[in-house]
Amino acid sequence: MGSELEILREYLARRNMRYTPEREAIVREIFARHDHFSVDDLYLGLRKKRRRISRASIYRTLPLLLNAGLVGQVFQEGGQTLYEHTYGHEHHCHLRCQECGQVVEFAEPALMEVEARLAKELGYRVDGHKLEVSGTCPNCQSKGR
Amino acid sequence: MGSELEILREYLARRNMRYTPEREAIVREIFARHDHFSVDDLYLGLRKKRRRISRASIYRTLPLLLNAGLVGQVFQEGGQTLYEHTYGHEHHCHLRCQECGQVVEFAEPALMEVEARLAKELGYRVDGHKLEVSGTCPNCQSKGR
DNA sequence: CTCGATGCAAACTATTTGCAGGCAC
DNA sequence: GTGCCTGCAAATAGTTTGCATCGAG
């Protein structure tokens, strides 16, 4: 535990950036959560813990965390960008119900092969992928027509 | 050719919505393009053809076209949402270079099986998927370290 | 005719940015 | 001490919406 803070520290050190209490608190908050979160979720979550960190700092910190591989962008919902922590988690994809917005995560190992194939065929260095499947959950199917 | 207009007409008729010159022009413009476009691209494209259609109408029309299956959302770039026409095209996925933004499209038939599996396992009715792979193109690899 | 659609401009809202102090190093 | 960071508030920019008018059915 806490190795996300190590990664943060190294990431910052390597670029002569500062390890501030704000950045640490943001990472702590992110890894304390187990859901998809928006900037506002983070802001309010921190606030509830008496940490007054401005939205601006969160907006400025998130790109660093994306870049450091600690956090990933999931998708957009209601105009907001949703994120999730990725470090220490199996890579997974998202299946989303269009009616109720429910999100199910699932593993898809076959995509590694796709990546490898693309790298070979097109000469790309592939860093990652994002698969979002959309449909209707069983529950909404029975409700809807 | 022109069957996208047919689809539009049917879609609107089925819901007692009106087949307006604006909606027709928007669809024509979309299918005349062969790229990923933003609302602004559409607006300016129409304008160049002397069709003065307000952005508001475009914003109001796009959800209909998404819903009718004529258009798909591709991803966000520079804060704007990018779309593409999907009707009449093989389904494909996107490989995107993080450095230069270049986008390569590729087919991935294996994803059909993934959809089928999910539908079976989770009871979802699956409507579609979006796979975005990110990496670095050969060109940018040689430039960057 | 009637009501849904359009254009305009104002409203919203997520995100970005300039600036004056603050603090990690 | 120096320069990167922070918070604040103002600025941006994409998208949405209210309203008067227009026109498809």
Image (cartoon, coloured by chain):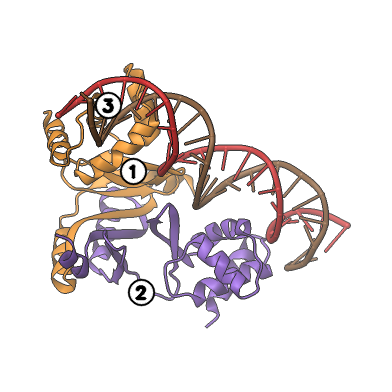
Chain colours: A purple, B orange, C brown, D red
Mark 3 to mark 1 CA distance (whole Å):
30 Å
Indicate which label's residue lies in the foreground, 3 or 1: 3
Residue A14 as seen in the image, left or right of residue A4 = right
Q: Image height check: is B20 above or below A108?
A: above
Chain identifier of the residue bearing label 3 in the image: B
Q: Position of residue B106 (x, y in %)?
A: 23, 48
Question: Which residue ends up furthest to the top in the rendered image?
Answer: B50
Amino acid at the residue labelled 3: Glu
Q: Quadrant of residue A15?
A: bottom right
Kindly identify which residue carries mark 3. B22
Indicate which label's residue lies in the foreground, 3 or 2: 3
Amino acid at the residue labelled 1: Val
Q: Image height check: is B17 above or below D9?
A: above
Q: Quadrant of residue A138?
A: bottom left
Amino acid at the residue labelled 2: Glu
Secondary structure beneath dot 3 equals helix
Q: Image height check: is A134 above or below B85?
A: below
Q: Position of residue B85 (x, y in %)?
A: 23, 38
Question: Which residue ends up furthest to the bottom in the rendered image?
Answer: A1
Q: Are marks 2 and 1 in contact (CB under 8 Å)?
A: no
Q: Are marks 2 and 1 on the same chain?
A: no
Kindly identify which residue carries mark 2. A90
Q: Are marks 3 and 2 in contact (CB under 8 Å)?
A: no
Q: Which mark is residue B103?
A: 1
